[in-house]
Image (cartoon, rainbow, N blue to C red):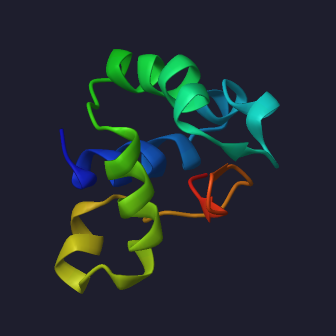
């Protein structure tokens, strides 16, 4: 589990309309740990990504602080598609 997996997952979803559609009902909502564990994490694991709610929250709050090397490792970067983890930290 890692913050890197969280960033890669959100980048993967943000760059693929079909994957984004799986979360359409969550857009514009704040995601708490229960919703994350019930809705997002199972899909992330099926896609091969394993990370915790706290790692996702930390990764998204620090996404603007990634180094150039880290950004190069994350294809497409992270973009806002309207879903936030609790403290209004955008995850998609």
One can see residue 88 in this view: yes
Q: Quadrant of the N terminus?
A: top left
**Residue at (61, 28) in percent of width and height:** 35
Q: Horizontal and vertical percent for residue 69?
A: 17, 78
Q: Horizontal and vertical percent for residue 36?
A: 53, 31
Q: Is residue 52 above or below residue 46?
A: below
* 2 on left or right of 40: left
**Residue at (41, 72) in percent of width and height:** 63
One can see residue 76 in this view: no
Q: Is residue 41 above or below residue 82?
A: above
Q: Quadrant of residue 67?
A: bottom left
Q: Is residue 52 above or below residue 60?
A: above
Judge by depth and name the residue closer to the eye, 2 or 79.
Answer: 2
Query: What is the tally of numbered marks visible in this picture?
Result: 0
**Residue at (54, 18) in percent of width and height:** 38
Q: Horizontal and vertical percent for residue 86?
A: 63, 52
**Residue at (22, 63) in percent of width and height:** 73
Q: Quadrant of residue 22?
A: top right
Q: Horizontal and vertical percent for residue 75?
A: 35, 58
* 21 on left or right of 65: right
* 21 on left or right of 7: right
């Amino acid at each position: 589990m890692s913050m890197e997996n969280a960033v890669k997952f959100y980048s993967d979803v943000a760059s693929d309309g079909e994957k984004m559609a799986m979360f359409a009902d969550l857009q514009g909502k704040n995601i708490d740990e229960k919703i994350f564990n019930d809705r997002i994490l199972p899909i992330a694991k099926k896609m091969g990504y394993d990370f915790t709610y706290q790692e996702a929250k930390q990764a998204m709050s620090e996404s603007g602080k990634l180094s150039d090397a880290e950004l190069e490792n994350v294809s497409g970067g992270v973009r806002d598609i309207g879903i936030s983890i609790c403290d209004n930290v955008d995850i998609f």
